[in-house]
């Protein structure tokens, strides 16, 4: 597909992932002014940066002025380093200063997410004065006007009042008399995951950001948090798959960067699987004496790996939601021990039924059928229990070592369970079957 034929906004949105960067810029230029403005606002910062970079300075200034300071900071950050100063130079002095301040924060901190433009009033104002003052501020492209923040002359946050409450209050009432002082705030260095959790816990539309001296610096709004939640979920899903998280969308990630992200964990997992081969070699004599044992190796180790993956996924997600804390590890261990024994018993029954059914229909196992069923049943009980406990505890270990718990991904847990699963299986076989 090429961008030679002009596309409408809906067609361009559908075709966007398949277009090369140059084709995207060319297709964007063919949109009408109104459609282009709406389409530009829906794009990711990287795409906005590429479109702006492909325009002359006069057009760049027009498109940059459509964005709020926090969105501008994202676009400047995504632009090539040698173009960032040129983009900043196109902004008016006030906006340029606001963007530079935002760029000084880490991208995943509250300070990096916030907008410095928010509605503010003084506590000694009357309600009428506050509304008139807010009307003047509204012309200044405020991020949101749902909440109005009450500040003292030193910019310390004293309270918050909704626009609705202001209209409902008596005209001569003072702002300090209608404001709420039970505030939920975040520090400018607070991690974005914590900010997202506060939004969910308190059902907020915006959250004030303060510095170390409790001076208000800006607000984080719910639309910013939607992007954060999506970004964090994508990162965790990629880590669950046994690789490092990508910084950019899949098709926009360079080939060798993709290889680097995937090769490291694959090498670690490969080395781990070597231990599985070593375990198989250690019990080679058992396989020689009872070849039938080999038939159940995939069943045993996959059951343990699947159970471990379930447990690790549940715990990692519970950690992300704040439902589980490090001190809860003992409660989790006891719970997963019981769950592992129960799940193992269920699978053991299924495995034994399968063996006896095959023996009854095909005479597949001869006089060893009973002992084989007992071996498989005991092994499943042990391997599934081990999978549940190790899958649940590994995220706690990773956090203790200051790694991301999501790195305790399903492949990593499966590799860990495979090795000990084989040891449990062949040990049970030696005791019961051989």
Image: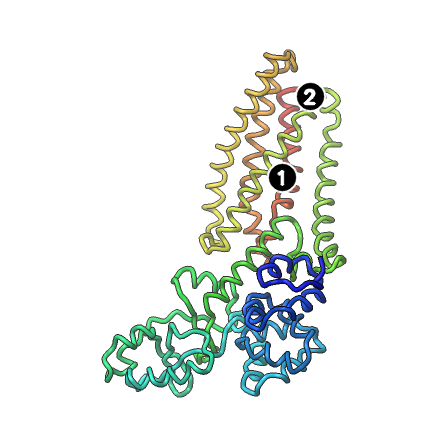
- Residue holding disc 2: 292
Nearer the observer, 182 or 258: 258
Q: Helix, strand or loop at disc 2?
A: helix
Bin the neighbour count of mark 1 within 10 Å (Cα to Cα): few under 14, some 14-19, many 20 and up. many
Which of the 4 image quarters holds residue 388? Answer: top right
Tag count: 2
* 3D distance between C-alphas at marks 2 and 1: 22 Å
- Residue at left 71%, top 20%? 290
Whether tag 2 and tag 1 are in contact, CB under 8 A, the answer is no
Bin the neighbour count of mark 2 within 10 Å (Cα to Cα): few under 14, some 14-19, many 20 and up. some
**Side (left or right) of 201 relative to 236:** left
Query: At which x and y percent is residue 6?
Result: 66, 64
Query: At which x and y percent is residue 353?
Result: 55, 20
Query: At which x and y percent is residue 283?
Result: 72, 29
- Residue holding disc 1: 417
Report the quarter where the C terminus lies.
Answer: top right
**Side (left or right) of 345 relative to 372:** left
- Residue at left 66%, top 33%? 422
Nearer the observer, 398 or 254: 254
Which of the 4 image quarters holds residue 15? Answer: bottom right
**Which comes before the other along the chain, label 2 or label 1?**
2
Report the quarter where the N terminus lies.
Answer: bottom right
Which of the 4 image quarters holds residue 137? Answer: bottom left
Q: Helix, strand or loop at disc 1?
A: helix
**Side (left or right) of 181 relative to 248:** left
- Residue at left 75%, top 32%? 281
Residue 90, compared with residue 293, is above or below; it is: below
Query: At which x and y percent is residue 429?
Result: 64, 24
């Amino acid at each position: 597909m090429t961008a030679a034929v002009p596309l409408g906004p809906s067609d361009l949105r559908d075709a966007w992932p398949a277009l090369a960067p140059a084709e995207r810029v060319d297709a964007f230029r063919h949109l009408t002014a109104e459609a282009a403005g709406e389409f530009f606002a829906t794009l990711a910062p990287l795409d906005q940066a590429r479109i702006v970079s492909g325009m002359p300075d006069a057009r760049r200034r027009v498109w940059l002025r459509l964005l709020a300071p926090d969105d501008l900071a994202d676009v400047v950050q995504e632009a090539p380093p040698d173009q960032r100063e040129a983009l900043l130079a196109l902004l008016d002095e006030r906006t340029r200063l606001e963007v530079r301040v935002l760029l000084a924060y880490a991208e995943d901190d509250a300070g990096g997410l916030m907008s410095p433009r928010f509605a503010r009033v003084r506590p000694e104002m009357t309600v009428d004065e506050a509304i008139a003052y807010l009307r003047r501020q509204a012309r200044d492209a405020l991020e949101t006007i749902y909440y109005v923040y009450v500040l003292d002359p030193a910019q310390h946050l004293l309270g918050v009042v909704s626009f609705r409450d202001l209209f409902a209050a008596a005209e001569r009432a003072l702002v300090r008399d209608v404001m709420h002082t039970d505030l939920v705030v975040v520090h400018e260095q607070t991690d974005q995951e914590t900010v997202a959790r506060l939004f969910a816990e308190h059902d907020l539309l915006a959250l004030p950001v303060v510095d170390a001296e409790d001076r208000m610096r800006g607000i984080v709004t719910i639309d910013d948090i939607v992007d954060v939640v999506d970004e964090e979920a994508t990162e965790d899903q990629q880590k669950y798959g046994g690789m490092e998280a990508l910084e950019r969308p899949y098709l926009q990630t360079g080939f060798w960067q993709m290889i680097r992200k995937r090769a490291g964990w694959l090498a670690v997992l490969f080395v781990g699987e070597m231990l599985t081969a070593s375990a198989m070699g250690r019990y080679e004599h058992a396989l020689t004496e009872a070849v039938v044992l080999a038939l159940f190796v995939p069943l045993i180790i996959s059951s343990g790996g699947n159970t471990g993956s379930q447990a690790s996924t549940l715990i990692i997600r519970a950690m992300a939601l704040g439902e589980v804390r490090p001190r809860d590890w003992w409660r989790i261990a006891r719970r997963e021990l019981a769950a592992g024994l129960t799940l193992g018993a269920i699978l053991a029954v299924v495995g034994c039924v399968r063996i006896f059914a095959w023996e009854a229909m095909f005479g597949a196992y001869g006089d060893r059928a009973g002992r084989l069923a007992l071996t498989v049943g005991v092994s499943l009980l042990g391997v599934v229990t081990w999978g549940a406990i190790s899958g649940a505890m590994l995220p706690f270990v990773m956090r203790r070592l200051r790694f991301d718990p999501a790195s305790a991904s399903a492949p990593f847990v499966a590799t860990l369970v495979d090795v000990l699963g084989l040891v449990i299986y062949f040990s049970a076989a030696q005791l019961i079957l051989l």
